[in-house]
Image: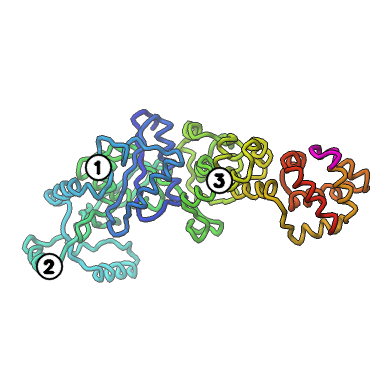
Amino acid sequence: MSTANTKTRFAPSPTGFIHLGNVRTALFSALVAARDQGVFLLRIEDTDLARSLDEYTQALMADLQWLGMHWKEGPNAGGDAGPYHQSQRSAIYDRYYQTLEQQNLAYPCFCSEQQLSVSRKAMLAAGKPPRYAGTCARLTPEQVNVKCEQGIKPTLRFRVPDSGVVKFGDLVRGEQSFAAADIGDFIVRRADGTPAFFFCNAIDDSLMGVTQVLRGEDHLTNTPRQILILQSLGLRVPEYGHISMIVGADGAPLSKRTGSQSVRELRESGYFPLAVTNYLARLGHVYESNAFMPYSELAAAFDVKRLGRAPARHDPNQLLHWQREAVARATVEELWEWIGDTARTLVPSERKLDFIETVRPNMTFPADALHWAQVIFGGTLQLDQDAQTVIAHAGGSFFESAVAAYDAHPRDFKQLAEQVKNATGAKGKHLFHPLRVALTGVAHGPEMARILELLPPDQARSRLLHCTNR
């Protein structure tokens, strides 16, 4: 399906900060809508009032916007199908509950959790799927009244047909078939009056005109239930696609313990949004090109048919790869803002361009920029034991020659190194390694020619001179 009428959605429950797994679902849905010039809708599924916090709602909206996912319908965007918080849609759900009850398609259930648990165990012991036994399915109105008068608050169960098959074409997994007899009557309204996920999620998708629902494969068995609800109410059924789960290095579902990070953590550590989207767009989805792409190109080349069915393995090294690609493509002004206030304070404003282009190949996060700002402009170096060993091995006379060479060529590292080589006979690693360590304190880093051009002259000379006494 690829038309301007495409409408996709992301429907999170605001019970915490969003992590890689659920933001990937949002991204896939947003890319489909952008590709088709359709609508990406955001709906807040906050019926769990005890756990749903406005703090999390505001955070997830900020995270989506940071990643470039701008919804056309939903909170702060408006739309004709609101309200877009489920906690504000109770009257809508009540109407459909009444319709189901009036048509004898739903009934009150007074079974306690203990009764249900015993029933499930008995079915499992008998080798049967654990479905509701239908204990309350045939209660008379009089029996219902008696239980209500006793103060027992019932749930509301949807009455599933005893026979037949629910079929649908999954956008990712192909044709799916579920026997109605294996599903069993399920709860659509809890005893406290709040709607069950099966119900409000399906009702809202249909009423809001969602045409494609992409969600995790853990929802696959929910889909036949939701199709039954919508069909019984004469509501339009969207297309469903169930994407693979993300697993960690150990093959277990990705969690905070196995390396999942919240989008907030990624942003605060200095990831670029396009690094995250380039990574996630390929996590379980294959592009013909493996080049770094702007958001518009990620959308244009996205194809649901290229979504894999096997679990997608989270690879932190791949995320780092895309981060480095983003750093390599960022403008000087973007990187100058990105490196943070502390690094900017150390770098003279007139050296901004030279500093950024010098250290760009050696930056992955703002902390790297701060390190090099301190190395180049931060005064006296604190040499670790390895650096001290390198300097001691080179010897004082080596650095006396280096000071003389610096005085002759204070901005030309090639000529400086050549003079030291001629004076000491040192070559290769034995020449360049001590010079780099003396001037920067570390064994690896940006090109020394560019470092020398940036180092304040008195500071560079002082560092070489300091090594003559070691």
Q: From the viewer's perspective, is the residue at label 1 or at label 3 nearer? A: 3
Circle 1: residue type: Pro
Percent x, y of residue 118: 27, 71
- Disc 2 target residue: 151
Q: In front here: 168 or 1? A: 1
- Label annotation for residue 340: 3
Q: In front here: 427 or 326? A: 427
Q: Which residue lies furthest to the left in this view?
A: 142
Q: How far apart are marks 1 and 3 (CA)?
A: 39 Å
Judged left or right of residue 25, residue 52 is: left
Percent x, y of residue 152: 15, 67
Quadrant occupied by the N terminus: top left
Q: Please state the extent of the stretch shown in magenta in the rendering.
A: 407-416
Circle 2: residue type: Gly
Tell me whether the residue at label 1 lies in contact with that at label 2, contact meaning CB atoms closer than 8 angstroms. no
Counting labels gives 3
Percent x, y of residue 196: 26, 54
Percent x, y of residue 32: 42, 36
Asked which secondary structure carries label 1, the reply is: loop
Q: Earlier in the sequence, mark 1 or mark 3?
A: 1
Q: Residue at x 77, y 49 (%)?
A: 439
Circle 3: residue type: Gly
Q: Earlier in the sequence, mark 1 or mark 2?
A: 1
Residue 423 shows in this picture = yes
- Disc 1 target residue: 83
Q: Main secondary structure of the magenta part?
A: helix
Q: Which residue is drawn at 11% across and 67% down?
A: 147
